[in-house]
Image: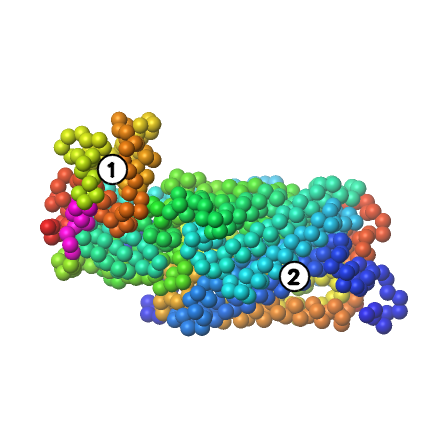
């Protein structure tokens, strides 16, 4: 299906081969990135569909749209699909896969076949998850709290647990590939201090994936064993300890938050300098704060358990450590903001997402301070306050970062430009819809509405209606980019190698890049974000 | 306040106002910080927007600034930490002489029993102005006892007791929610806490049908199960004398010292060999599976009552009808 209008098409990674085998057996990191893109987009819309059903159920105080058991499955599967099959793979597996080798000036990741294997693992896990969903579903909550999950739920806990267990290996292998690639395959001259911050963020993420995910795998396996073979690990009637499960689960699942948000921080650290035409403010502070987050992130897990029955003093230790991890996040926000100072700022779609990210992440981070305060947490934990807080981080942060990155690198990925005005419109829609959906939930939470409630007292209705209204706007904002990205692949304007005038090795090769990424091995003689040496696109007009 | 659109939960306990105070401080702080960041973004966006011929000024960064915006937030965070920890310490430390109510949670209801023997389901009557301590356990999965008006929440676990306490200050009817997801009817596992004026509370107590105080039913159970053969109160038997034990440190055979609280008594009934009192032999049989959660709380209440000088002096709220 070569386009007839272009006489001689330059060869690139998309047109070298069109056969189905060339995709399913691809070892090119760029093609695998696209396989991931298709896979996680399907899961994103599946998880989003569950979310819409949840919001519709909560439109009225009575439980009248779906049955209680159905509702419990909906929020469980919304969480599992969104976290394990969308957010965790999102930026690393799609943008990271596509960009990490290009940004370090390599031909591919260190282990191309393992990269393909990790996609197949995610697909296998996804198939198992879909089978679980379509043959009855699971209602344990995404957190699998015991003894409910091991001894009381009569849904498909084992299947969901195994699906996530397998997905974990996909995540571990991707992390391993990144760590080795970043250590061993940097182009000549590309020292650690010249690496893009996107790479630093992915390096920190990969370390968490490597060290944290095995703990989740073991924990889920123990849940499966206790459920299947009635071992007494977590169930107190068989001599187990339900709190042990929570410790093990959160030991992974709190750092997992940073698996989701750090890559988005990396994206923002690329976009803001580009559209401010400036070197990032405080390069090493931003780079080191990623590592600090990865390290401190492992030391705060029990802040999910302040009312779970842990001792007074361990709660105090975990509270103070939680405040320490907030410092590197604050450093990042201040440095991004300072980067805009005395810049020459362009408001293209990626920049709108990045600015939205700073705003929403700031709100998400500041409300984290509420939850780390022991006395406040007792009142608001397990309420909608927590729901609002982590959606500001995961959706306002991670998803905004993902969408911003997708818009930023879309010309590189597809070789085409999307319609800019539609991009801006969608970005604003997402921002407004998001705030209308989740801000009322902070108030609901302080009022005391518990999470995971199928029906609720009538005084909470007005805020719930606002939230549901917002979610429909948000849905429009998410569907739009999918439509115009698909449209642009055929009808979008042709993008040149560097349509934004961005720094970074990935922009020094053609769009879309050739399979081997670079015609010759690049040699880096410049610092990262050398925007004083790169003309902005307005100065070198391209067909836009 | 709008009936159908409240923006603030009613504060109805002595601790609620303190939690609200920290919350308001945090709202102001967060509001100020977000406003500062948003203002800077908007100002920079307007002032430094792209103009033809105008170039960005390259700035490397600033170590003094990095230090400032790490150290100042950290200092503020430490203030919040200490403030929050003080509140938590109070929330987690029940006053010694608090009136106990025993709570057994199950899918999907709350069963509550007062020391005087009144039993309630999904409803808790308490007098205004007294310290109330709940001793809670679950028959099945994890639940969580949550009263937003009191700003308290505590998970209720199977296989152990957890406690929470409050001091109601305002008569009224308040929501009781289960806050830890527990299965199908999680959102139906709700009830109410009715805070009454002391006189009304006395009337309520008198009107209730009881089969004697909780400690009394514990005492008869204690007899039925044959406990007094070893745990004698007159001379030293094969088991420790239980009079005056509750709330006191107990020296164990392995040299450790533990406090005889509700969880210790519970464990000693269900797994007697876990902690052997110094000077005794591990000869007590387990009662795991022989006593229900309700019976366990009765036994605990009885053993607790052995440490109170005389139940008549327990305070104005307990001139309960005793049999």
Residue B37 seen in this snapshot: no
Q: Position of residue B232 (x, y in %)?
A: 17, 34
Percent position (x, y) of residue A465? 45, 71
**Separation of disc 2 and disc 1 at Cα?**
59 Å
Q: Is residue B74 above or below residue B189?
A: above
Q: Which residue is the site of mark 1?
A: B247
Label 2 marks which chain's residue? A
* Prevailing secondary structure of the magenta residues: helix
Q: Does residue A57 lie above or below A404 as drawn?
A: below
Evaluate whether residue B13 shows in this view. Answer: yes
Q: Quadrant of residue A83?
A: bottom right
Q: Which mark is residue A39?
A: 2
Chain of the residue displaying label 1 = B
Asked if residue B6 lies left or right of residue A480, the reply is left
**Vertical placement of residue B309 versus B128, above or below:** above
x and y percentages locating residue B96 in the rendered image: 24, 42
Q: Nearer the viewer, residue B30 or A471?
A: A471
Q: Residue at x 15, y 52 (%)?
A: B212
> Relative to A432, is B201 on the left or the right?
left
Instruction: Classify the position of the C terminus of chain A by image quarter.
Output: bottom right
* Front-lying residue, A266 or A450: A450
Q: Which residues are magenta?
A: B210-221
Q: Which residue is at 79% across, 66% downward?
A: A494
Color theme of the render:
rainbow
Q: Is residue A73 magenta?
A: no
Quarter assignment of residue B148:
bottom left
Q: Are marks 2 and 1 in contact (CB under 8 Å)?
A: no
């Amino acid at each position: 299906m070569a386009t007839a209008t272009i006489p001689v098409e330059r060869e690139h990674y998309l047109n070298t081969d069109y056969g189905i085998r060339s995709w399913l057996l691809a070892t090119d990191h760029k093609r695998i990135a696209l396989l991931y893109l298709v896979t996680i987009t399907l899961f994103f819309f599946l998880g989003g569909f569950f979310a819409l059903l949840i919001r519709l159920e909560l439109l009225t105080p009575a439980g009248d749209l779906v049955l209680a058991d159905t509702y419990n499955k909906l929020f469980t599967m919304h969480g599992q699909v969104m976290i394990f099959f969308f957010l965790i793979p999102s930026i690393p597996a799609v943008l990271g896969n596509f960009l990490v080798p290009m940004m370090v000036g390599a031909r591919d990741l260190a282990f191309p076949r393992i990269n393909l294997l990790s996609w197949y693992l995610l697909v296998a896990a996804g198939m198992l998850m879909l089978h679980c969903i379509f043959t009855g579903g699971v209602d344990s909550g995404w957190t699998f709290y015991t003894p409910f999950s091991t001894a009381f739920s009569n849904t498909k806990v084992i299947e969901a647990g195994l699906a996530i267990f397998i997905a974990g290996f996909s995540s571990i292998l991707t992390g391993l590939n990144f760590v080795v690639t970043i250590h061993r395959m940097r182009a000549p001259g590309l020292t650690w201090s010249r690496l893009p911050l996107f790479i630093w963020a992915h390096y920190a993420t990969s370390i968490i994936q490597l060290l944290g995910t095995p703990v989740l795998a073991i924990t889920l396996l123990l849940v499966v064993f206790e459920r299947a073979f009635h071992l007494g690990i977590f169930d107190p009637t068989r001599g187990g300890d339900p709190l042990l499960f929570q410790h093990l689960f959160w030991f992974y699942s709190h750092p997992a938050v940073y698996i989701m948000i750090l890559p988005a921080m990396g994206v923002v650290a690329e976009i803001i300098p580009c559209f401010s035409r400036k070197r990032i403010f405080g390069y090493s502070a931003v780079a080191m704060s990623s590592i600090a987050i990865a390290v401190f992130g492992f030391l705060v897990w029990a802040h999910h358990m302040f009312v779970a029955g842990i001792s007074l003093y361990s709660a105090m230790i975990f509270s103070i450590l939680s405040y320490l991890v907030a410092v590197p996040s604050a450093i990042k926000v201040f440095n991004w903001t300072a980067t805009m100072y005395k810049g020459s700022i362009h408001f293209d779609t990626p920049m709108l997402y990045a600015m939205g990210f700073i705003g929403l992440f700031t709100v998400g981070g500041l409300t984290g301070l509420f939850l780390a305060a022991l006395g406040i947490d007792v009142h608001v934990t397990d309420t909608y306050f927590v729901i609002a807080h982590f959606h500001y981080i995961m959706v306002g942060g991670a998803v905004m970062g993902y969408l911003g990155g997708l818009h930023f690198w879309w010309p590189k990925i597809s070789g085409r430009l999307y319609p800019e005005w539609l991009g801006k419109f969608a970005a604003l829609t997402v921002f407004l819809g998001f705030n209308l959906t989740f801000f009322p939930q902070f108030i609901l939470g302080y009022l005391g509405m518990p999470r995971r409630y199928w029906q609720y007292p009538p005084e909470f209705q007005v805020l719930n209606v606002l939230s549901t209204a917002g979610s429909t706007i948000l849905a429009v904002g998410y569907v739009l980019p999918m439509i115009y990205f698909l449209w642009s692949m055929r009808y979008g304007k042709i993008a040149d190698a560097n349509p934004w005038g961005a720094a970074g090795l990935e922009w020094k090769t053609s769009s879309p890049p050739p399979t081997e990424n670079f015609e010759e091995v690049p040699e880096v003689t410049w610092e990262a974000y050398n925007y004083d040496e790169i003309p902005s696109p307005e100065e070198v007009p391209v067909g836009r | 306040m709008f009936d159908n659109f409240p923006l603030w939960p009613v504060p109805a306990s002595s601790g609620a106002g303190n939690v609200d105070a920290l919350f308001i401080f945090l709202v102001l702080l967060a509001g100020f910080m977000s406003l500062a960041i948003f203002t800077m973004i908007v100002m920079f966006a307007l002032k430094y927007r792209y103009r033809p011929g105008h170039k960005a000024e390259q700035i490397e960064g600033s170590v003094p600034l990095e230090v400032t915006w790490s150290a100042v937030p950290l200092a503020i965070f430490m203030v919040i930490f200490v403030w929050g920890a003080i509140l938590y310490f109070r929330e987690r430390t029940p006053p010694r002489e608090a009136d106990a109510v025993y709570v057994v949670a199950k899918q999907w209801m709350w069963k509550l029993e007062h020391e005087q023997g009144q039993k309630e389901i999904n409803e808790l009557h308490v007098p205004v102005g007294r310290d109330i301590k709940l001793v809670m356990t679950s028959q099945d999965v994890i639940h969580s006892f949550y009263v937003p008006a009191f700003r308290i929440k505590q998970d209720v676990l199977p296989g152990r007791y957890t406690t929470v306490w409050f001091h109601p200050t305002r008569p009224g009817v308040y929501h009781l929610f289960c806050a830890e997801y527990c299965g199908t009817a999680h959102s139906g596992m709700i009830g109410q806490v009715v805070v009454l004026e002391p006189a009304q509370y006395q009337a309520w107590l008198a009107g209730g049908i009881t089969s004697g105080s909780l400690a009394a039913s514990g005492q008869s159970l204690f007899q039925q199960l044959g406990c007094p053969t070893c745990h004698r109160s007159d001379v030293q038997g094969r088991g420790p004398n239980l009079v005056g034990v509750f709330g006191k440190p107990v020296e164990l055979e392995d040299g450790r010292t533990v406090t005889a609280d509700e969880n210790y008594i519970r464990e000693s009934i269900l797994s007697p060999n876990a902690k052997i009192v110094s000077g005794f032999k591990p000869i007590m049989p387990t009662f795991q599976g022989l006593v229900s959660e309700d019976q366990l709380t009765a036994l605990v209440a009885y053993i607790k009552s052995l440490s109170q000088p005389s139940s008549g002096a327990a305070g104005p709220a307990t001139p309960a009808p005793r049999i």
